[in-house]
Image (cartoon, helix red, strand yellow):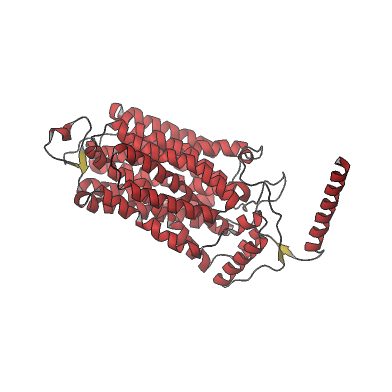
């Protein structure tokens, strides 16, 4: 019986070899998805891709930044203490952390497009439910569910990365920060109008609209051709590439699309494969530190405004909720006034301030050195925030910090999407995003709890973490500048570089 099975396996193996030889006759020209993407080049399809997939950042920013502008109101409504306000942000990122791994795993197995659509439907549904939360406990639970849905928005970045020619990735991907900035400014602007008039519940409902509208236009973007070919669905990948070529007015490469299917996709053990083990561990450290610093800046900004901790400030930054004794309780029940919203907008605009320099650094200095420099500068500005200065000075420091932490996120997103092959790219980004949320979960307790006890202690902690990340970035073993996107784990010595920026 065993001999018969062995013989059958040998026959099947010979048939597969024979079929493979028939499929690719000697002398016939073939091309890969990577070669097709490079040959087709950049055009109208990629502009549409940039606008639609980039807009996922608007929805994500509005949902994440929502907590910063809603916190003062729920603090007042439910008389919350510092740790309870911090817990809201923490559970959002806990949901993000858990679902980021799950959705990344599913995206590598079932497709980026499907998971992106599912995540938007999920986030919009639970976000709307949050606006009807009858209590603090329900609010916390529902926001955790929203965080889980938002974690899938990263598939939009992966789809963009897998369709862009290599020399354009370093320029187009950082520009996606414009959409995050737009979402952040939009939610702050809406909050300044909606919160004082019809309340925070209507703000949450309004913030759900961009995500719902985006669902309607996802149909114009196809599934990643790299993903399709990695699963053996060459026909679908070819149709997608032909569609892109037609939209761009370009021609396809000569020959037949040939690329071996990768049976092993979305496996955790691949992330710690000897080729990627060191890279993965250092990426996780960097992601964790960047998120810790990014959300630390955002929440610290809110605390400076809410508690009027600006050294030497004489103008009131906040608006008391009333003469009720409860408004002066340990719960710090205060509402943002116009000046506070204005300062938040100014500091948020900082996220785009260094974008041109960030793009130049990424493309000419490389991903690693650029990230090392911006992380080091972030550490410096955290310490400068401790200088006793006017409200204008603090706003300036916050402006620069937002610019730097935004540049950090730009670079690490690009690096992570480029360094992993197609068979594990979504899992690599998803797992990194999950570890990143650990930093985001800790940040509220440093910015909103520790900062109340020791302002300089909190700032030194943020600065120290940034220094560790800078060192980790500088020592990353792989530079992805000009590197072609890999399909699977390539053997040592395989060519991976192209003549690209």
Q: Residue at x 58, y 57 (%)?
A: 166
- For the C terminus, give its image quadrant: bottom right
| Residue 382 visible at all | yes
Q: Position of residue 484 (x, y in %)?
A: 62, 53
Nearer to us in this view, 38 or 244: 244
Quarter holding residue 464: top left
Left or right of 422 on screen, residue 100: left
Nearer to us in this view, 137 or 342: 137
Q: Residue furthest front?
A: 1
Q: Answer above or below: position of 390 versus 496.
A: above
Q: Residue at x 37, y 43 (%)?
A: 143
Q: Residue furthest left?
A: 323
Q: Residue at x 50, y 56 (%)?
A: 171
Q: Position of residue 316 (x, y in %)?
A: 17, 41
Q: Answer above or below: position of 37 versus 460.
A: below
Quarter holding residue 95: top left
| Residue 186 visible at all | no
Q: Position of residue 198 (x, y in %)?
A: 21, 52
Quarter holding residue 456: top left
Left or right of 273 on screen, residue 430: left
Left or right of 169 on screen, residue 339: left
Report how many numbered discs are placed on residues in the image: 0
Left or right of 367 on screen, residue 376: left
- For the N terminus, give its image quadrant: top right
Q: Residue at x 57, y 73 (%)?
A: 249
Nearer to us in this view, 248 or 400: 248
Q: Position of residue 4 (x, y in %)?
A: 87, 45
């Amino acid at each position: 019986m065993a001999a018969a099975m062995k013989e059958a396996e040998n026959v099947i193996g010979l048939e597969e070899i024979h079929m493979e030889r028939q499929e690719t006759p000697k002398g016939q020209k073939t091309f890969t998805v990577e070669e097709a993407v490079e040959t087709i080049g950049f055009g109208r399809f990629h502009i549409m891709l940039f606008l639609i997939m980039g807009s996922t950042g608007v929805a994500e920013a509005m949902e994440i930044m929502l907590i910063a502008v809603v916190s003062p109101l729920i603090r007042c409504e439910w008389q919350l203490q510092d740790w309870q306000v911090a817990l809201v942000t923490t559970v959002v990122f806990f949901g993000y952390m858990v679902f980021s791994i799950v959705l990344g795993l599913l995206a590598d197995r079932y497709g980026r497009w499907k998971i992106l659509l599912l995540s938007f439907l999920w986030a919009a549904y639970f976000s709307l439910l949050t606006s009807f939360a009858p209590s603090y406990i329900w609010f916390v639970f529902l926001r955790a569910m929203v965080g889980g849905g938002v974690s899938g928005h990263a598939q939009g970045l992966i789809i963009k990365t897998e369709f862009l020619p290599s020399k354009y990735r370093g320029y187009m991907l950082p520009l996606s920060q414009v959409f995050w900035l737009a979402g952040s400014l939009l939610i702050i602007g809406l909050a300044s109008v909606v919160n004082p008039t019809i309340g925070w519940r209507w703000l949450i409902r309004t913030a759900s609209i961009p995500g719902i509208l985006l669902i309607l236009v996802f149909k114009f973007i196809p599934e990643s051709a790299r993903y399709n070919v990695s699963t053996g669905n060459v026909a679908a990948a070819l149709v997608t590439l032909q569609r892109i070529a037609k939209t761009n007015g370009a021609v396809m490469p000569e020959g037949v699309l040939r690329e071996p299917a990768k049976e092993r996709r979305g496996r955790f053990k691949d992330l710690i494969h000897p080729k990627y083990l060191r890279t993965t561990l250092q990426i996780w450290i960097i992601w964790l530190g960047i998120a810790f610093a990014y959300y630390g800046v955002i929440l610290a900004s809110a605390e400076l405004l809410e508690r009027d901790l600006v050294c030497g400030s004489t103008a009131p930054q906040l608006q008391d909720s009333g003469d009720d004794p409860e408004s002066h309780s340990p719960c710090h029940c205060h509402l943002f006034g116009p000046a506070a919203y204005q300062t938040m907008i100014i500091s948020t605009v900082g996220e785009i301030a260094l974008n041109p320099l960030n793009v130049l650094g990424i493309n000419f200095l490389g991903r690693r050195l650029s990230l090392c420099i911006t992380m080091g500068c972030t550490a410096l500005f955290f310490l400068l925030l401790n200088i006793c200065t006017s409200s204008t000075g603090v706003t300036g420091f916050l402006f620069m910090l937002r610019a730097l932490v935004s540049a950090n996120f730009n670079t690490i997103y690009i690096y992570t999407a480029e360094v992993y092959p197609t068979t594990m790219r979504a899992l690599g980004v998803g797992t990194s995003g999950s570890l990143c949320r650990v930093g985001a979960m800790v940040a509220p307790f440093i910015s909103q709890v520790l900062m109340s006890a020791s302002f300089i202690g909190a700032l030194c902690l943020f600065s120290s973490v940034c220094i560790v990340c800078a060192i980790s970035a500088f020592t990353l073993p792989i530079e992805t500048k000009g590197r072609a996107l890999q399909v699977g784990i390539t053997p040592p010595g395989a060519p991976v570089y192209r003549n690209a920026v």
